[in-house]
Image: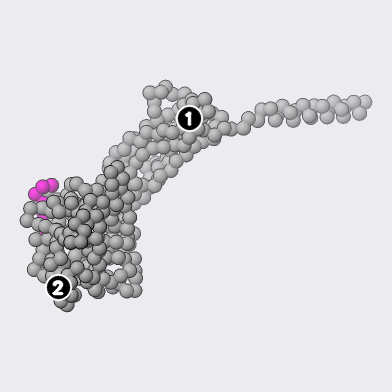
Amino acid sequence: MPLLMAAVMGIAFTSCHKDKKDDTTAKLYLNGSVKFNIPTYVRPGDIYELTPSGVSTKEHGSVGYVWKVPSVSEVSDTTRKQNDPVSVDGTYRFRVPNKPGSTTITCTAFADGYYNSTKTVTIVIVSSQESLTGATESGETGVFVDSRDRRKYSYVTIGGIDWMSENLRYMGGYDFDNAVALRDIFGGYYSWNEAAEACPEGWRLPDKNDWASFYASVSGNEPAEDLLSTFEGISGKMMVDARFNDDRLWEFWPDVKITGESGFRALPFGYGIVGENYSKFDGYKEYAIWWTADLCEEAPDKAYYRYIYKDKGDLFLGNAGTDSFVANVRCVR
């Protein structure tokens, strides 16, 4: 009898174990990956309609979506359940918080029997009034109002010439990383062909003589006979020790002493390379670059620009294509 009971118990144990295994179903992976679009740089108060896409079940069925934005709420927001009608597309209406800084946006797609699929992006909230600090600590001569769009520009008189102490922000050209929110802070990025026509009435692009006068006034030295040469030892007098969203723009380098005493207010906002349906921006926190009015005599499809590099004390001269390279603009009068 004990042997029979043991056999029965063994059969029962085996049977129970088998049933448990049958009840366990492995989850599947959703097809594709979650997609939604929002600029990297955004302005406080702007509203974006974020519509998710890119995922489905193996049977090409629908999925649900849930969103999480910690800076807005600790509670997740489900914008679509798996079995909602097709007309419910899971769009999330996002209002950018008012405080400059960074935040994340996470969208998770879910479906019964499937692992979740998640996408997280980090956006940077920028304010023309609050994000850039320390840039106005150097002196200015006055303020000019561009009659075309009513934007205001500080300017400083150097060597008898008025120089804008901010990058031109007039329409046209490009925005850094194609982020409209950055124009009022970084300025516009123009090809030379665009820059030649961009300055307000009464202002113009500075030519080699203007830059030579600038150098003589800031350095106290006469420039070399060749005005298209490096101007030594003045970059620190042009730079200003500013911060963007509390991030220091010019790193410390022993060869560069930042005083900002010229009032020019140079900031390292980089440059861009552009083409048909193409743009790439680089040099942020490394280069400050401005077009000159001068074309290259040996290559008329190129023009000169003046630039500062983060760890060098000089103001250099470079050249680039008149329609493929985009840089900031400072106008003079």
Q: Are marks 1 and 2 in contact (CB under 8 Å)?
A: no
- The amino acid pointed to by label 1 is Ser
Which residues lie in the magenta part? 142-149
Residue sitting nearer the eye, 326 or 79 = 326
Residue furthest toward the right?
A: 1
- The answer to whether residue 94 is above or below residue 224 is above
Local secondary structure at mark 1: strand
Q: Residue at x 51, y 28 (%)?
A: 57
Q: Mark yes or no: residue 134 visible.
A: no
Residue identifier under label 2: 217
Residue 145 is one of the magenta-drawn residues? yes
Residue sitting nearer the eye, 261 or 94 = 261
Instruction: Decide: few, some or many residues near mark 1? Use Cα within 10 Å; few <14, some 14-19, many ≥20.
Output: many
- State which tag comes first along the sequence, 1 or 2: 1
- The amino acid pointed to by label 2 is Ser
Quadrant in the rendering for residue 315: bottom left
Report the number of discs. 2
Residue furthest toward the bottom?
A: 221
Task: Give x and y (percent) for residue 296.
Answer: 19, 61
